[in-house]
Image (cartoon, helix red, strand yellow):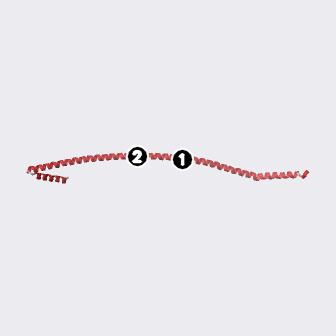
Amino acid sequence: MPLNIDWLQILLHLFNFVILAGGLTLLLYVPVTRFMAGRQGRFEQREQDLARREATLADKERQYAELCRQAEDKQRAQDEAAEAQRRALLEASEAEARQAAEGILAQARADARREREQALSNIREEVTELALLIAQGILEREISAEENAALIDACLSDWSRQT
């Protein structure tokens, strides 16, 4: 043996090293690798779940936005319909009020015409009576101009008290 190399010792050390490396691989490397692979799988699964949730959330946000838009459109349409209905009712009310006012005004005019005609009729009758009284007074006696004026004034004051 040159250089004092014992090949058997080298082979035994080599065999011990292989056993140690195999044992460490089986006891440490494989479980740690499995743990890391499992952990990486869980993280990937979480990322996929998160991506799905984000996609679902985005879909729900779009649906929410669409529902909000539809609700706003529906509300706007209802508001417009209510406004149109309010305008129609207001116009109908105004038309009815105008018709009622025109009817009242026509009735008032007719009443005023009747009252005027009645007043004119009454005045004609009173003037006729006054003229008859004056004529009767003149025929019964001979009156001076002063007495005639006094008689006319008395009849007029009597007439103005009656009206």
Q: Exactly how many numbered labels are in the figure?
A: 2
Query: What amino acid does circle 2 point to?
Result: Arg
Does dot 2 land on a helix, a strand or a loop? helix
The residue identified by callout 2 is 87
Query: On the picture, is 151 further left or further right than 112?
Result: left
Query: On the picture, is 98 further left or further right than 147?
Result: right
Q: Residue 53, position in %: x, y?
A: 61, 49
In depth, the one of 36 and 94 nearer the eye is 94
Dots 1 and 2: beta carbons under 8 Å?
Answer: no
N-terminal label among 1 and 2: 1
Q: Residue 99, position in %: x, y?
A: 33, 45
Residue neighbourhood size for the residue with mark 1, other residues' Cα within 10 Å, grouped as few (<14), some (14–19), many (≥20): few
Tag on residue 65?
1
In depth, the one of 142 and 17 nearer the eye is 142
Q: Is residue 1 visible?
A: no
Residue at the spot 54% in from the left edge and 47% down from the top edge: 65
Q: Is residue 24 visible?
A: yes
Q: Residue 137, position in %: x, y?
A: 10, 51
Residue at the spot 67% in from the left edge and 50% down from the top edge: 43
Residue at the spot 14% in from the left edge and 48% down from the top edge: 131
Residue at the spot 12% in from the left edge and 50% down from the top edge: 134
Query: What amino acid does circle 1 point to?
Result: Ala
Name of the residue lying farthest toward the front: 145
Q: Residue 127, position in %: x, y?
A: 16, 49
Query: On the picture, is 90 further left or further right than 148?
Result: right
Name of the residue lying farthest toward the right: 1
In depth, the one of 94 and 141 nearer the eye is 141
Residue neighbourhood size for the residue with mark 2, other residues' Cα within 10 Å, grouped as few (<14), some (14–19), many (≥20): few
